[in-house]
Image (cartoon, rainbow, N blue to C red):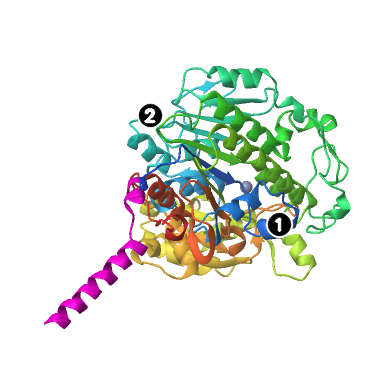
């Protein structure tokens, strides 16, 4: 009897010890929901994961390296849907789900209900603020689920401020969500100003007007030369090659790029977008927002969503292997350091949390791949359409069966099918069997398949996550790896392959553990991770999960 009691005591002691070592102490229970004063979400447009290791030795201590040194690095982070474009990317990061749910199926898509092409952030029911142009007629109206930023607004009774900033409208609008205080984006041309829409406000706040009046963008009308001696850019190809696009008026796509001289020919302030100066300008404006909106100054958590768009413009023009890309990332690293230093100063070290990811990655220029014997090539959309229409004419004796081909989706003409008494499923199937044989085509799936099966195989799985019953097309075409529909210079993106899906994911600051993982994480995991960190409800259609190693 005594013996049993003793062992019972030993058992209880062991349990207590276990509880004390693994459980929460009274102090940490109190701190369990201690929130950061500010969350800064950073999306780098078109950033490949390998830009971290590729340029690692060239980065300073205060930017990317600081995030890794102090925070958490998810090394195997992927987009889990197609198409990997900017609109869907930003929406997926912030809604924690994929186009199947949030409805942003592309940047532009054919809207079958109104028989015309629409833009993801376009809104004809609102007006521009801060510009005489129509560039402000934008809102998140086409995104049908909530964002982590919306959930923060709901959780704080609208007291936590949410501000979205980017050069591109969609890069500012979609992250900021439906209930944001403001989203600002850059209007180039002859204006060079950050603008907004009546969706958010009737007029620009004073700090924005002041920023625009200071002609902050004008300081970047200067020469773009490499930050360091060009001979040290060994992580890139040679500056002179056949795989890069030129600015209008340039003889070759080589340094230095003289913005002063190229100004008029390249739409004035628009030229800044395709240089690293666009990211510096974005940083200037983000810093002005931190000051002007007093972000992170009171007890309610605020959210600053910043997207660096210029990395995408540079990638599209010069390609992922260019000296221009290397220089753009070395300069972005300095801009990040500048932003983090400002946050340390204004909000305080340890009082804010940051994540950094991309909206998609990008492919090596296929012409370059071909030149080093790696498979890749180009796909002609117009040839594809001609061949497909010839087939349909032969098979069904009718013209105009295809209403639209966009984003590698075929939209069929339902009225015509009915007129000819054709079965939609059969026509979809016939098209799939035909076009799979065309040059450059890898796989073809029909809408019927998307709806009937629950795919786990990589290609159809990613298609299905991007397939929206109401908005997507009837037949989905997947190109071969390394094959793109694009000019022979510069890089693009949009596919299901690793070069487009593998993107960085870094966290640092308040509530973030130090570490790294090579376990697969997916873009929709970001919003629930931040929601868990903030102790707020997940965005309403989240399909991802919090990454427990980051915040546990
Ligand atoms: Zn792009």
Residue 68 is situated, as x and y percent measured from the top left of the image, at: 60, 55
Number of marks drawn: 2
Asked whether, in this view, residue 205 is left or right of residue 19, the answer is: right
Q: Main secondary structure of the magenta part?
A: helix
Q: Is residue 122 above or below residue 545?
A: above
User: Which one is in front, 430 or 207?
Assistant: 207
Residue 507 is situated, as x and y percent measured from the top left of the image, at: 53, 51
Residue lying at the far left in this picture: please name it.
1
Q: Residue sitting at 45 percent across and 25 percent down?
A: 200
Boundaries of the magenta span: 1-30
In the rendered image, which quarter is residue 17 located in?
Answer: bottom left
Around disc 2, counting alpha carbons within 10 Å, would you say few (fewer than 14), some (14 to 19), or many (20 or more)? some
Asked whether, in this view, residue 205 is left or right of residue 285, the answer is: left
Q: Do we see residue 449 in this rendering? A: yes
Residue 302 is situated, as x and y percent measured from the top left of the image, at: 45, 34
Label 1 residue SS: helix
Residue 179 is situated, as x and y percent measured from the top left of the image, at: 40, 32
Tell me, for residue 56, which label it has, or none.
Answer: 1
User: Which one is in front, 359 or 394?
Assistant: 359
Tell me, for residue 67, which label it has, or none.
Answer: none
| First in sequence: mark 2 vs mark 1 | 1
Q: Is residue 149 above or below residue 355?
A: above
Tell me, for residue 159, which label it has, or none.
Answer: 2
Real-space Cα distance between discs 2 and 1?
A: 39 Å
Asked whether, in this view, residue 320 is left or right of residue 415, the answer is: right
Label 2 residue SS: loop
Q: Do we see residue 539 in this rendering? A: no
Q: Is residue 310 above or below residue 65?
A: above
């Amino acid at each position: 009897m005594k013996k049993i009691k003793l062992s019972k005591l030993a058992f209880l002691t062991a349990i207590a010890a276990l509880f004390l070592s693994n459980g929460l102490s009274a102090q940490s229970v109190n701190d369990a929901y201690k929130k950061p004063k500010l969350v800064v979400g950073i999306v780098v447009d078109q950033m490949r994961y390998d830009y971290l290791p590729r340029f690692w030795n060239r980065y300073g201590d205060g930017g990317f390296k600081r995030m890794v040194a102090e925070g958490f690095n998810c090394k195997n982070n992927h987009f889990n849907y197609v198409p990997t474009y900017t609109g869907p990317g930003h929406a997926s990061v912030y809604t924690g789900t994929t186009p199947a749910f949030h409805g942003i199926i592309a940047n532009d898509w054919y809207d079958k209900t109104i028989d015309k092409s629409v833009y993801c952030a376009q809104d004809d029911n609102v007006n521009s603020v801060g510009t005489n142009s129509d560039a402000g007629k934008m809102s998140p109206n086409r995104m049908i689920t909530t964002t982590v930023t919306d959930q923060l607004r709901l959780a704080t009774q609208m007291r936590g401020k949410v501000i979205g900033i980017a050069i591109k409208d969609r890069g500012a609008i979609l992250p900021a969500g439906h209930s944001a205080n403001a989203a600002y984006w850059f209007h180039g041309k002859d204006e060079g100003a950050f603008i907004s829409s009546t969706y958010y406000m009737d007029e620009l706040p004073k700090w924005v007007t002041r920023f625009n009046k200071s002609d902050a963008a004008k300081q970047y009308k200067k020469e773009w030369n490499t930050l360091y001696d060009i001979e040290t850019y060994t992580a890139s190809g040679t500056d002179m090659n056949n795989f890069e696009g030129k600015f209008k008026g340039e003889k070759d796509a080589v340094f230095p790029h003289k913005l002063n001289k190229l100004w008029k020919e390249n739409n004035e302030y628009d030229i800044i977008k395709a240089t690293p100066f666009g990211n510096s300008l974005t940083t200037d404006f983000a810093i002005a927002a931190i000051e002007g909106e007093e972000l992170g100054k009171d007890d309610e958590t605020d959210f600053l969503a910043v997207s660096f768009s210029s990395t995408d413009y540079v990638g599209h023009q010069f390609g992922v292997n260019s000296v221009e890309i290397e220089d753009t990332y070395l300069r972005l690293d300095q801009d990040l350091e500048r932003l983090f230093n400002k946050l340390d100063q204004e909000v305080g070290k340890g009082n804010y949390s940051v994540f950094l990811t991309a909206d998609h990655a990008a492919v090596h220029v296929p012409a370059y791949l071909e030149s080093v014997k790696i498979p890749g090539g180009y796909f002609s959309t117009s040839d594809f359409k001609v061949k497909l229409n010839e087939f349909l004419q032969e098979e069904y004796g009718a013209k105009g069966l295809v209403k639209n081909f966009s984003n590698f989706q075929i939209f069929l003409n339902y009225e015509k099918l009915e007129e000819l008494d054709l079965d939609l499923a059969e026509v979809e199937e016939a098209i799939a069997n035909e076009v799979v044989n065309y040059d450059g085509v890898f796989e073809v799936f029909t809408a019927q398949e998307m709806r009937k099966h629950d795919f786990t195989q990589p290609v159809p799985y990613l298609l299905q996550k991007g397939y929206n019953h109401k908005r997507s097309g009837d037949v989905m075409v997947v190109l071969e790896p390394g094959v793109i529909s694009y000019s022979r210079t510069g890089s693009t993106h949009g596919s299901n392959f690793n070069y487009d899906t593998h993107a960085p994911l870094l966290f640092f600051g308040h509530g973030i553990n130090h570490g790294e993982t090579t376990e697969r994480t997916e873009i929709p995991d970001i919003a629930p991770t931040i929601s868990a960190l903030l102790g707020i409800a997940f965005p309403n259609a989240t399909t991802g999960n919090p990454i427990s190693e980051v915040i546990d």
